[in-house]
Amino acid sequence: MTDQNDAAEDKGRPAATVVIVRDRHDGPPELLMVERASSMAFAAGALVFPGGAVDEADHDLAARIDHGLEPDEAAGRIAAIRETIEEAGLGIGLTGAVDAASVLRLRDGLHDGRTLGEMLEQLALGVALEALTPFARWHPARFEQARRVFDTRFYIARAPEGQVASVDTTENVRLFWSSAADTLAKAAAGEAQLVFPTRRNLERLALHDGYAALIADAGAYPVEKIRPWQEERDGEVHLCIPDHLGYPVVTEPMTRVRRV
């Protein structure tokens, strides 16, 4: 058994990802999923939520605005906003005259190497970090030997109205809206690949019938850094997570786990 409280706090690169929720009147909410390109070093070919690494410009913008958050938390939310614009063409957590055209201009500027702060200033837009609700935080343990080690903050945000998501075709090859249960069913049928954290998060998200219920669930549990550990159960080695953070499934045989 590997101790879940491994004293060695090996660092992972800060990252952020966001579960974008679109309520439906006739069924469970839909979540935006993106499929990673098979050429990517991290989660190649897997379905994930939009997101990516926190960069220095995210910290710089966080330091310049009034948000009342811990600096790393603010930078994480800014990274989630930026990555969603880049990867999905959606402007979550923005203030001002936000429409499809302005989001497209933001995306083009980011792809051209300009910072989010520069583009927001040019377009007279701002950020509303409170639009992102903390949901979870995941960090691989050392024994997992992940090729890319990210300390990832997960957020929940409502899908913006009047905007249409579109894939960036660089890091990702497609995107689609699906309920958490339907995405899990695709994976069970061999039609999709899910890494361990995404699968566990989808199982938790599938318990709830709308955005409001998901926000209530997020507030009902602490956002503790989840570092999976190995443990032998019934003669088989499992990958495990804590059982007090709202996840309905907290263990999976290592033979079935995809981690990266």
Image (cartoon, helix red, strand yellow):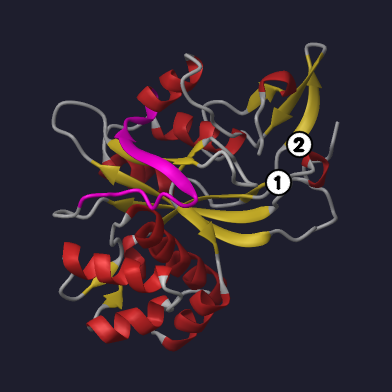
Q: Nearer the viewer, mark 1 or mark 2?
A: 1
Looking at the rendered image, the quarter that the C terminus falls into is top right
Closest to the observer, 219 or 25: 25
Dot 1 or dot 2: first in sequence order is: 1
Quarter of the image for residue 252 reads: top right
- The residues bearing labels 1 and 2 have C-alpha atoms spaced at a distance of 9 Å
Which residue matches tag 2? 229
The amino acid type, in three-letter code, at marker 1 is Pro
Above/below status of 64 relative to 169? below
Quarter of the image for residue 77 reads: bottom left
Mark 2 closeness class: few <14, some 14–19, many ≥20 residues within 10 Å: many
Residue 106 numbered mark, or none: none
Which residue matches tag 1? 140
Looking at the rendered image, the quarter that the N terminus falls into is top right
Read off the magenta span: 164-181
Q: Position of residue 61 (x, y in %)?
A: 45, 81
Above/below status of 78 relative to 60? above
Above/below status of 172 relative to 102? above
The amino acid type, in three-letter code, at marker 2 is Trp
